[in-house]
């Protein structure tokens, strides 16, 4: 079975974690004989190499003299080359994280909505199943975003909201429909580890994960205070004799913030850049305290029972913390440093209980059972 994975890949560590979580879980279903296809996502030469290295298939599209040659080639002849015809795809799993809602209305258009509609209908006409894995949705007050989610709903076989607010945003429009379900982030089932040298570098460190979106997607006062907020925290931990690791969870913009912080404290920190997603999660798991502005960084801290705090630019952070029973873990960038440090001093309360973790893992396993039953 050819299973295409959309919006999960190598563009950032969260997307890469979701890709690994999907392939690891479904590879256990031998009756499916799954072959995983790298779907809608960012492509470049580096991505091509990562696709091959991770054993993923790539869609085959080749035309010469206006003849669609992929139409006349049998799929089995393409398998050894890691290529798949679009018409061979039987399932689409979309792991977009957060892609539908009013926050993105600036990039929406009538043309984009029509493109999305054409994309999904093309697969539906061939009988493919389309499943949206747990992600944040909404709100949908703007005309274009409401039109977009209607297109998604019409073509989806299953839609999983990652939190109660996202679920509410969907049910306000579509009612309690059987195709709308709720499940937590599914990377909770991944348990990677790291080599000894990296382990010794990060063991018992304080880990700080920045996010450039805290500057670009927040109010002016938050954006203006964010850098100094991180610098003050870093200085405090260094003065306390703690080892501080600045971890790049995603982008060039994040690394720029890390470099500036390092310069501000005379390079008395460890900078970790260009690790793969599994290494990033494992690094977080071996630290003593996590302060993360990246969503999947927060997820990795919570589901590995690391005392975890975060900053927020979306409702998805608040809902994630509630899910793990750690509601008092959002740090206010505008608060004075003493207030923040007092909040962090209560770190023992910001660790998910064993019972809560077991419950969440059970919900993710139930989600996969329902999906497997559907595609079987």
Image: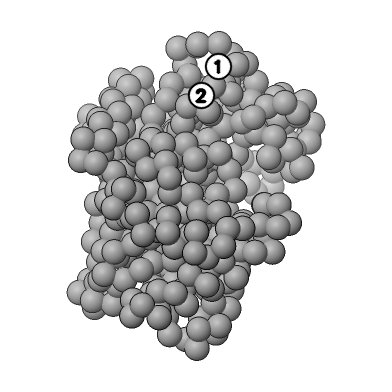
Q: Is residue 45 visible?
A: no
When asked about the image quadrant of residue 307, the answer is bottom left
Label 1: few (<14), some (14–19) or many (≥20) C-alpha neighbours in 10 Å: some
Q: Callout 1: helix, strand or loop? A: helix
Label 2: few (<14), some (14–19) or many (≥20) C-alpha neighbours in 10 Å: many
Task: Say which quadrant the N terminus sits in.
Answer: top left
Q: Callout 2: helix, strand or loop? A: helix
User: In whole angstroms, how far apart are the C-alphas of marks 1 and 2?
Assistant: 6 Å
Q: Position of residue 86 (x, y in %)?
A: 52, 36
What kind of colouring is applied to the model shown? Answer: one colour
Residue toward you, 215 or 91:
215
Q: Are marks 1 and 2 in contact (CB under 8 Å)?
A: yes
| In-image side of 376 versus 179 (left or right) | left
Residue toward you, 371 or 219:
219
Residue at 28 percent across and 59 percent down: it is: 285
Q: Which mark is residue 171?
A: 1
Please determine whether, in this image, residue 285 is positioned above or below residue 169: below
Mark 2 lies on residue: 167
Q: Position of residue 291 (x, y in %)?
A: 43, 60
Residue toward you, 89 or 227:
227
Task: Say which quadrant the C terminus sits in.
Answer: top left
Q: Position of residue 246 (x, y in %)?
A: 44, 71
Q: Position of residue 148 (x, y in %)?
A: 68, 28
Q: Is residue 167 visible?
A: yes
Residue at 28 percent across and 52 percent down: it is: 348
Please determine whether, in this image, residue 187 is positioned above or below residue 310: above
Furthest residue in direction bottom, as rendered: 266
Please determine whether, in this image, residue 50 is positioned above or below residue 130: below
Residue at 40 percent across and 74 percent down: it is: 237
């Amino acid at each position: 079975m050819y299973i295409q994975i959309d919006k999960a890949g190598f563009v950032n560590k969260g997307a890469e974690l979701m890709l690994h979580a999907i392939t690891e879980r479904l590879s256990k279903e031998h009756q499916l004989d799954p072959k995983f296809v790298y779907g809608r996502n960012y492509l470049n030469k580096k991505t091509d190499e990562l696709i091959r290295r991770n054993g993923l298939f790539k869609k085959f599209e080749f035309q010469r003299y206006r003849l669609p040659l992929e139409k006349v080639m049998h799929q089995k002849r393409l398998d050894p080359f890691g290529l798949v015809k679009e018409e061979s795809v039987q399932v689409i799993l979309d792991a977009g994280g957060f892609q539908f809602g009013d926050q993105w209305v600036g990039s929406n258009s009538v043309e984009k909505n029509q493109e999305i509609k054409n994309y999904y209908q093309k697969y539906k006409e061939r009988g493919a199943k389309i499943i949206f894995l747990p992600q944040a949705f909404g709100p949908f007050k703007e005309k274009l975003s409401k039109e977009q989610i209607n297109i998604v709903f019409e073509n989806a076989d299953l839609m999983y909201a990652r939190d109660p607010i996202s679920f509410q945003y969907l049910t306000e429009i579509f009612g309690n429909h059987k195709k709308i379900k709720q499940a937590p982030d599914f990377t909770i089932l991944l348990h990677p580890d790291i080599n000894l040298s990296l382990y010794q570098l990060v063991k018992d460190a304080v880990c700080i994960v920045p996010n450039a979106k805290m500057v670009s997607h927040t109010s002016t006062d938050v954006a203006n205070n964010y850098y100094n907020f991180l610098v003050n925290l870093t200085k405090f931990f260094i003065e306390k004799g703690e080892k501080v690791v600045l971890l790049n969870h995603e982008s060039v913009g994040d690394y720029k913030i890390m470099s500036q912080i390092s310069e501000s404290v005379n390079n008395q920190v460890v900078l970790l850049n260009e690790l793969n997603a599994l290494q990033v999660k494992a690094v977080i798991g071996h630290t003593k305290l996590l302060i993360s502005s990246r969503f999947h960084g927060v997820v990795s801290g919570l589901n590995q029972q690391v005392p975890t705090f975060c900053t927020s630019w979306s409702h998805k952070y608040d809902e994630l913390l509630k899910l793990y029973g750690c509601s008092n873990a959002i740090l206010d960038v505008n608060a004075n440093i003493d207030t923040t440090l007092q909040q962090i001093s209560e770190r023992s309360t910001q660790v998910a209980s064993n019972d809560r973790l077991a419950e969440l893992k059970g919900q993710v396993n139930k989600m996969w059972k329902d999906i497997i039953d559907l595609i079987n």
